[in-house]
Image (spheres, coloured by chain):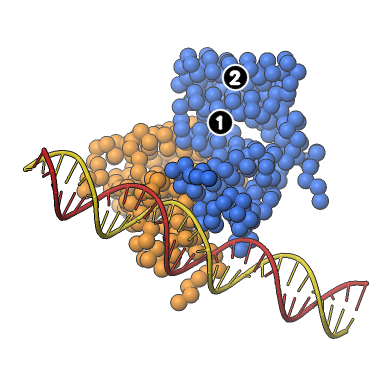
Chain colours: A orange, B blue, C yellow, D red
Amino acid sequence: MPDNLQRGLAVQMVETLRERLLSGRIASGTRINEVELARELNISRGPLREAIRQLVSEGLLVHRPNKGAVVFEAEPGEVEALFELRAALETAAARLAAVRRDRKDITALRRSCERSRKHLAAGRQFVHHNDLDFHRALLEAARSPRITEQVWRVQQQIIVVRSRQDVATSHSDASLTDHEQLAEAIAEGQADRAAELMERHLDRVRLQMITSMTGADTSQD
Amino acid sequence: MPDNLQRGLAVQMVETLRERLLSGRIASGTRINEVELARELNISRGPLREAIRQLVSEGLLVHRPNKGAVVFEAEPGEVEALFELRAALETAAARLAAVRRDRKDITALRRSCERSRKHLAAGRQFVHHNDLDFHRALLEAARSPRITEQVWRVQQQIIVVRSRQDVATSHSDASLTDHEQLAEAIAEGQADRAAELMERHLDRVRLQMITSMTGADTSQD
DNA sequence: AAAGTGATAACTGTTGACAGTTCGATCGAC
DNA sequence: GTCGATCGAACTGTCAACAGTTATCACTTT
């Protein structure tokens, strides 16, 4: 049964594991068993170990010598540090976006906000997916692949940690307002204002996440 | 010859290869031969492949499917993008440093500048090592391990690319002046000014590197 | 009964061999 | 002489077995 898509197995496994990590199917703090996982994926341990090594380097897993890899987990202090990094990257991205955006970027940003607004009006929650969409559009407008790549890495780590919590409480309407203001600031080319809005936005999201972690900790087994 | 230090071989090899990459002993653009390198290092290909996978993830190597890994190399446009990322990180670090620094950080920053000034006065070049020292002290003052880690990664990539060029032309006295101004701004707690100085400093270094790349390209053939 | 100790099992770390692919070289045809 | 095809060598991708280490559990001893 050669379902091999010309790509190497290790690369394939990176994507497979990444999906499982981000979807929460493999929860934060879980220990990775190489033989078991290799069996389940119908591959040998070689490529799997390479995939694990890459995900460790990306920060989604952490490596304990002679004890294997465990899924990244963070205490509130770590999350603070993570958001500090994310703020450094995304405020710069907001500045760049305000300078480099073209008409298509602006419409994309506004469209993202509209979609979220409709979701909200329809009584549905403002979900994580909406948030990611907006930030993706913003990074697209910033035209800085390197910054985009790093932001995506940090977001991945945050998603993995967040997967422990109740997704329903992870976002509020205020985030959407932040997005809308950001979109307008970028549309008008106000770089400094965009950066400031982004910083405040991330501050809000950070606080929300921290309180969610300390308040309703679902991490007991 | 039991050179085994309890650490895993893959981790050891990551450090060994990193040192060779940063020192320029393995030049930018070089293709990595797994069997040959494994032989030279007296290990098997397994751990070596894991080490390579990690260095690829760190950006020091790039992976070509079925063709192995080659040492990261960048054209001027790529370097621009790299400095964009570095600026995003280090301007934020400068801001944080201006806020969080204590007395020890300030003296460390000033000491670094003094050492460089003396090197310069002694007729010696302002070398890369001096530059790294200052930025390390600044990142230490910023107290943000995550940002520090990412800055270090970008710097590594830049160092690898820069290793092609003549090291003598890689820095000027202007950089030292920038450092001194930065140190004072941080000492006085002027976050915005520190960020602006850092941005201009990196702009200068970037330009210097770009011209050095386009002008005196040592990559014959 | 509790604590220490040793054996056993499970898992990570490592190795050497095998399969598939790509690049180069050599030989042949035009 | 040059272009093209086919053969071969070299290298990456993959796998299964081996070695070393850690953790667990039963057993002994006080």
Does B8 sit left or right of A190 as displayed?
Answer: left
Task: Using the image, determine if residue A85 lies above or below residue B141.
Answer: below
Q: Residue at x 38, y 36 (%)?
A: A78
Label 2 element class: helix
Question: Reading the chain from its start, which is encountered first: label 2 or label 1?
Answer: 1
Rendered position, A36 above or below A166: below
Residue B129 percent coordinates (x, y): 64, 28
Residue B80 visible in the current orientation: no
Left or right of residue A32, residue B65 in this image: right
Name above or below for residue C23 compared with residue A180. Answer: below
**Label 2 Cα crowd, 10 Å radius (few <14 / some 14-19 / many 20+):** many
Amino acid type at circle 1 is: Glu
Residue B135: x and y, percent? 58, 27
Q: Chain of mark 1?
A: B
Query: x, y (%) of residue C7?
Result: 24, 55
List the residue tagged with mark 1.
B90
Res. B112 mark: 2
Q: How many marks?
A: 2
Query: Can residue B167 be seen at all in this image of the molecule?
Result: yes
Disc 1 packing (10 Å; few <14; some 14–19; many ≥20)? many
Discs 2, 1: same chain: yes
Label 2 close to label 1 by CB (< 8 Å): no
**Closer to us: mark 2 or mark 1?**
2
Res C28 quadrant in image = bottom right
Front in this rendered view, residue A157 or B122: B122
The residue sitting at 44% across, 65% down in the picture is A44
On screen, residue D18 versus residue B208, left or right, reads left
Disc 1 secondary structure class? helix
For the point 35% across and 56% down, which residue is it? A33
Q: Position of residue A24 (x, y in %)?
A: 34, 54
Amino acid at the residue labelled 2 = Ser
